[in-house]
Image (cartoon, rainbow, N blue to C red):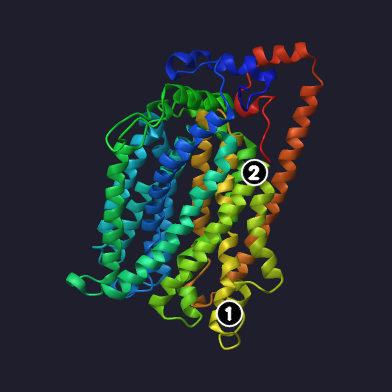
Amino acid sequence: MSHNPLIDEKKDNQVESEIDELALFRNYDPELTWTKEEETAVVRKWDFLVFPWVCVMFFFLQLDRGSISNALTSTFLKDLGINIDDNNIGTIIFISAFVFFEVPSNAIIRRVGPSVWIPFLMIAWGTVSIGTAFISDKTTYYVARFFLGVTEAGWIPGTLVYLGDFYTRAELGTRLGVFWGTITFATAFSGLISYGILGNLQGYGGLRAWQWLFLIEGLGTIIWGILSFFYLPKNPRFAKKKLLRFRDWVDERQERIAVARVFRDDPSKGTGQEEHVTWNDIWLALKDYKLWLHLITGFIGLMPNGPLSGYLPLIINSLGFDLIFSNLLTTPLYLFSMVFMIVVSWSSSRYGERALHSALGVLVSFLNVLLKKTGILLTAFVPATAVSKWVRYVFLFPLVAGFLPWHGIQAAWISGNMSPSGKRTVALAFYIMSVNLGSLPGSQIFRAADSPLFKEGFKVIIALTAVGLTLFIFQFFHYRFVNKRRAAIWNAKTEEEKEHYLSTTTDIGNARLDFKFLQ
C-alpha cells in the first residue's frame, strides 16, 4: 500500500500549484508515493546523523553561556572587583546585544544558509569565551558579555529553520523538546566540569580556576564549530558524501522522499533558505496578533528561569553546602529537568497538542508553591535550621523542572503556526528575542541586598508563574475558537466556492482560510 502523508485530497491542487515552480530547483515529484516504512527510514537518517550533531552544537552554546553562573562560585567576582549587581548589569548588556543583533543575524542566515552561518557563529562565540578568560576588571567583563551576545544572536532561530528542512511540523515537537533538553543537559554537565576545574586547577599555569573554565569550554566550542563546516549538509538534497560524511546518507529515492514529504507538509519551505528576509516578511509577522500572544507568553513565562539558572549554585550554597560542591549538585536537578522536558514534549507531539502541555510545566511549579511543597517556599521562607539541607535540596527538583519544558514546545508551536517561510524565520527570531528580553527584568529579580535566600525575588517569581499559566490556558481556548470559526466558514462553502477560493485567494500562509492552527 502506497503512502502519501500529511496531505488532504481537497488541497492537492493548492499544494501542487504552489510548488510547481519549485520542481526544477528542488527535485520535487508531485506524483511520488512511498510507504510508511520508507518514510520512517528517511526520518531515522536525520535522527541519527543530523539532529544529534546540532544538539551538540547547542550544548556548547549553553555551556559557554552558562559559564558565568559556575564561575560565580569561585574567586571570579573578587578577582574582577565586582558584585552581584554588577553581574546583573553584565547580563543586561549580553541580552541587549543578543536581541539587537537577532534579526540582522537571521537576515544573513537567509542569504548564506544555516549550514554555513551557524558553524561560523559557533566559532565566533568560542573565541569570545576564550577571550573572557583574560578579562581583568568590570569594563573588560562588560565588553566580553557584549560580544558574547553579538556572536550568539541568530544561532537558535537559524537552527530551528535548518531543522525545519528535514522534519515536518508534527515531527518537530518532540525533537525540539529534546533540542531544548540539551540546555538542561549542558547545564548539568557544566556542573560536573566546573566541579573538576574549579576544584583542581586553581593557580595551575599561573591562571585562576575560572580562567581555565572559559579556556577549556571555548576551545571545545571552536573545534566543534570547525568540524560542523564540513559535516552539516545544506539540506536533504545535499546529504551526499563529503569530508566528515564518509558516504552518501540517502540514495536518490530517499532524497526525493525527503524533499516531497516536507514540501507537502508546508509548501512555503520550498522558497529556499537562501532567499533574503524582506520587509514584507517582517510586516507579516508584526501584524499577526497571534504571534504577539506567543511573544508576550515567552517574555513573561521564561522570565523566572534567568535568575534561577544564573544563581542556582549560589542558592544551593545558601542551603548549607560547600561552594564548589554546590556546582556538582546542580547536575541532578538539570538531568531531572531534561527528562521531564523530553517526556512532556513527546506527549505534546504524540497527541498533537501544545498549549496544555506547555501549561503543565508551569503548573508543576505553581501548584507546588500553593501547596507549600516546593523549593521556592522551603528555600525562601523556612529558616535553614528548620529543615535538613538535603530535604530542602530535594524540593528544588520540581522548581527547576517546571519552567523549561514548554520552551521547546512553544518554538515548535510557532514554527507550525507561522507561515510562509520568511514570516516563520522572522517569527522565530522575534520569539527568541522576546524570551531574552524577558531576561532583562528577570536579571534584576535577585538582588545583592536580598541574597542569599532571595525571599523578595521568589515572591516575584510566584506572581510571574501565575501569569504565565494564565496565558497558556488563554491560548488554548483562543486557537480552538479560531479553528472552529474557520472550519464553520469553510464548511459553509460549496465545492465550487472552495475551488474558486483556492485558485484566486491572495491570502498566504497561515492567513489562508484552509490553514488549521496547532493548539
Figure quadrant of residue 326: bottom left
Q: Position of residue 273 (x, y in %)?
A: 43, 28
Q: Position of residue 299 (x, y in %)?
A: 57, 52
Q: Which residue is mark 2?
A: 350
Does 158 sit above or below residue 509?
below
Q: Across the whole image, how many numbered discs are drawn on residues?
A: 2
Which residue shows up at 58% across the image and 15% down it? 16
Q: Position of residue 322 (x, y in %)?
A: 42, 81
Direction from residue 418 to residue 253 in the image, left or right: left
Q: Are marks 2 and 1 in contact (CB under 8 Å)?
A: no
Direction from residue 352 to residue 214 in the image, left or right: left
Evaluate whether residue 293 shows in this view. Answer: no
Which residue shows up at 51% across the image and 27% down it? 269
Give the secondary structure at mark 1. Answer: helix
The circle drawn on residue 463 is none
Mark 1 crowdedness (10 Å alpha carbons): few <14, some 14-19, many ≥20: few
